[in-house]
Amino acid sequence: MKIEGLNPYYSEVFDFLASKKKEAGLWRRERDMALTYRETDFSDTDAMLQALHELQRLNKIYIGELEDNKDFRTALKAEQPPLWEDFTAPPADNALQHSLAEKVYNIRPGEKDTGFISLGSATKEVGKWLIEKCMEDNAPFVIQFSDPTFDALVLNHATDSNVKKLAESFLAMTDHANRRMAAASGMPEKDPVKPDTAKEKLYQSILKPYGQRVRSGDMFFTLTIIPTRKDAEIDGIPYEEYTKLFFEMCDQPWDHITQAQAILIKELNAGKTLRMTNADGTDVSMNISGFTFCNSVIAKNVPGSEVFSAPQRESVNGKVIAKGRFIHDREIIEDLTMEFENGQLVRWHAESGQEAFEKAINLDDGARWIGEIGIGTNPHLKRHVANGLLVEKIGGSFHLALGAAYTLTEYGGIPVKVNNGNTSALHWDITTMLHGKEGCIYLDDRKIMDNGKWIDPAYDVLNRGWAAVPSAERPAYWQDYFENNQP
């Protein structure tokens, strides 16, 4: 397979680098090597992905006009951020990783889809499967390799004008893609270089059209975030145990959960007010009249699941005390207290990470308002973790998203109303535990959840997962699981 055969975008990258061939520069050797990839017929997926990652870096270096910047080259050499050949995979059977990749893969045969694939540093096996499946289906795609330290160094050394060009290049790369598949990684073991705050803000501001495409559903987005050893360390869970938990969360009775959530959504859609309380001091209420909830299982997030919507923007009032560690922009923030008045966050405190929290809520005018209310329903996770994807799925929890509302008008083919008008470059879900915290949910003053458990028997599978499914209907693994692990 030749790289240009993956997507016409790569012809543009090769043409751009070829236009620089007469220039000397500090990167001429790497540039000339990358240009040889144009004629290379790759038979090995790993070799092709390594070449694509190198190509991604060189494209950014030349767009950022850093080809003669000695300070940038010295800083990059000192950091030595990983390329594809250094990427890893979690300690799990390949069959489990391929099963995860199948859930993330969202290309529709015969629909002329174009994929945008994002790969984190712990996704080697999942990433290869996604790439090879796209090639098997003859689906064009582009790849973005997670490269936080490299990208930060590029931004830090680029001029504002070139920062804009870098952001515009990302928009151009993704412009024709309509299906994103993101296999991200959790926290890196080595802290990445931090980007300059002003330049990062400038870069993100130009990417707003991309964010709007994702939130509107114009670009269908399926995401997984594979835990790393650093995630396990942060949460105090042995890594092998954390990995096992992750893959078990991906393998829940999704058909049963979908049906239970459909009943729950019908009940929520008929309600007007929602109130959540817990023993930590959380007591927050909001008006959900006129909005409808989405039945989110594993079409967009793997693992699922949750139901989510939005409150009326000015209706959120009360206090949220969210215990635990939270990660935003690779910064750890711990034990949050947030107070809302008429929808706006007016007082806040973090036991640690206050500066990082304030950086997030000062991003723009919409960052201190709520764009989403979600209730986690994955029955296999009942404890707080820092991983951003997993934490919002905890069974017996709720989350409020600071920042942008979704602008979806349908979800899974069902019309929905989830847009409360709040706009922001931020969309950050902050989860509060109800399970084990005497946590309750009230719908129109009627208690529907008590101590993190749904009261109505119709929602039993959301409380107990496979344990609520008749034994004969469970896969062999889950029959053995409940024999050896009493629920």
Image (cartoon, helix red, strand yellow):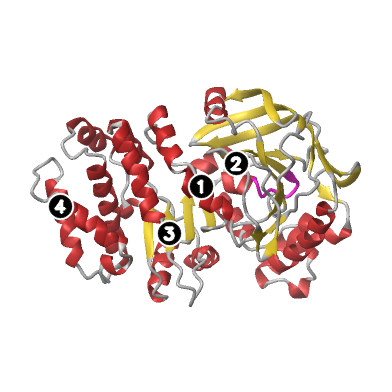
**In the rendered structure, which disc, 2 or 4, sits on the residue that comes first in sequence?**
4
Viewer-side residue, 450 vs 71: 71
Q: CA distance from mark 4 to mark 3?
A: 26 Å
Magenta range: 392-397
Residue 433 to residue 469: above or below: above
Residue 451 is left or right of residue 34, and the answer is right
**In the rendered structure, which disc, 2 or 1, sits on the residue that comes first in sequence?**
1
Q: What amino acid type is highlighted by mark number 2?
A: Ala
Q: What amino acid type is highlighted by mark number 1?
A: Gly
Mainly helix, strand or loop, the magenta region? loop
Reading the image, the residue beneath label 2 is 404
Q: Quadrant of residue 133 in the image? A: bottom left
User: Quick check: marks 4 and 3 in contact, CB under 8 Å?
Assistant: no
Reading the image, the residue beneath label 1 is 211
Q: Tell me the crowding category of disc 2: few under 14, some 14 to 19, or many 20 or more residues within 10 angstroms, Cα based.
A: many
User: Quick check: marks 2 and 1 in contact, CB under 8 Å?
Assistant: yes
User: Quick check: marks 4 and 1 in contact, CB under 8 Å?
Assistant: no
User: Quick check: marks 1 and 3 in contact, CB under 8 Å?
Assistant: no
Q: Tell me the crowding category of disc 3: few under 14, some 14 to 19, or many 20 or more residues within 10 angstroms, Cα based.
A: many
